[in-house]
Image (cartoon, helix red, strand yellow):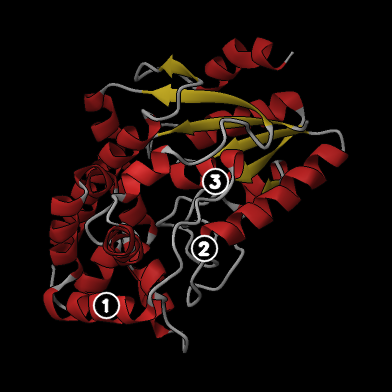
Amino acid sequence: MTRVNFILGCTGGGKAALGLALAQRLSGEIVSVDSMKIYRRMNIGTAKPTSQVQADVRHHCLDLVEPSETFSVARFVEAADAAITDVASRGKIVLAVGGTALYIKALTEGLFEGPAADEGLRRELKARAAEQGVPALHVELATLDAEAAGRIHPNDEKRIIRAIEIFRLTGKPISQLQRQWGSGQSRYECVFIGLRRGLEDTNHRINARVKRMVEQGLCDEVAALLAEPAGLSAQAAQAVGYAEMIRHLRGELTLEEATEQIKINTRQFAKHQRTWFRRFAAVQWIDVAPDDKAETLAERLLPTFE
């Protein structure tokens, strides 16, 4: 069975830097496990590795689709499976790096299918989202399934609608059904390494990261994407960093207000990630101090790969 080494943790926690340091030391390749890095030209707001970094270490599952397209978990699993097979066939170590917990779970345990879509119900919920706002649906979800609402972002229309749809169709919360997800047998031989930072350190890193993204030209990146003929899909437009900048470009927020909202929403997203990762029992958690360097952590972890 092919071995896949997962480097996971909350946003801004240093996963990419550790993955890169390990890949350089192990002659490995990186499979991105990030639901927004799959979009082309969404670079700054997703903290996508630069062309120089990608020239140094080969990355997979980046830039898979146009920003105007929607993307499913099933498509990710298909792309990641192909990448893992390719990397392993060349005798390279597979480093799956990212924080999209749903992608990690689907890749390791298989897909959670749930009941078939009900188009009439979806039209109803989408109409309500357009009229009342997506956060209003999130409030409803919280009354039906507090656990799912706790890990789904209030602006994630697609997942909110699917969670409400499943409850309406089955009478059971999606969180309850997902706990039954998987046979307990993994599709790969998996090693999970998780980076864990203190809350104050995490928040500081997130705030600094958002500031850096804005300085690097996040607003211009979003404006250029909106100017493309096909525009942004609803899925891409709800990404943290992009949703807030879209509101700024529409005149609803000042740049300063948008920047602060990105910081708040990113910290909230990190909280959702922590909730998800509690369900991963086999993770070797590494407590990271603010002054720890990726290279030092990589050296400490090298025996894991022997």
| Alpha carbon separation for disc pair 1 and 2 | 18 Å
Q: Where is residue 21 in the image (x, y as percent from the top left)?
A: 61, 28
Q: Tell me where residue 6 sits by quadrant.
A: top right
Q: Earlier in the sequence, mark 3 or mark 2?
A: 2
Is 108 or 243 nearer to us in this picture?
Answer: 108
Residue 106: mark = 3
Residue 252 can be seen in this image: yes
Image position of 255 with respect to 146: above or below: below
**In this view, which residue lies farthest toward the bottom?**
229
Image position of 36 with respect to 103: above or below: below
Q: Earlier in the sequence, mark 1 or mark 3?
A: 3
Instruction: Tell me whether circle 1 and circle 3 mark residues in contact (CB < 8 Å).
Output: no
- Residue kind at label 1, given as amino acid type: Lys
Give the residue at x 34% y 60%. Answer: 159
- Residue kind at label 3, given as amino acid type: Ala
Q: Is residue 261 left or right of residue 27?
A: left
Q: Name the residue under label 1.
A: 126
| Alpha carbon separation for disc pair 3 and 2 | 11 Å
> What is the crowding at mark 2: few (fewer than 14 residues within 10 Å), some, or many (at least 20)?
few
Callout 2: helix, strand or loop? loop
Q: Mark 2 points at which residue?
A: 72
Callout 1: helix, strand or loop? helix
Q: Where is residue 220 in the image (x, y as percent from the top left)?
A: 36, 70
Callout 3: helix, strand or loop? helix
Q: Where is residue 1 in the image (x, y as percent from the top left)?
A: 78, 31
Q: In this view, does 239 lie to the left or right of 33?
A: left
Is 130 or 87 nearer to us in this picture?
Answer: 130
Q: Position of residue 69 (x, y in %)?
A: 51, 75
Give the residue at x 58% y 59%. Answer: 74
Q: In which quarter of the image is the C terminus?
A: top right
Give the residue at x 29% y 30%. Answer: 202
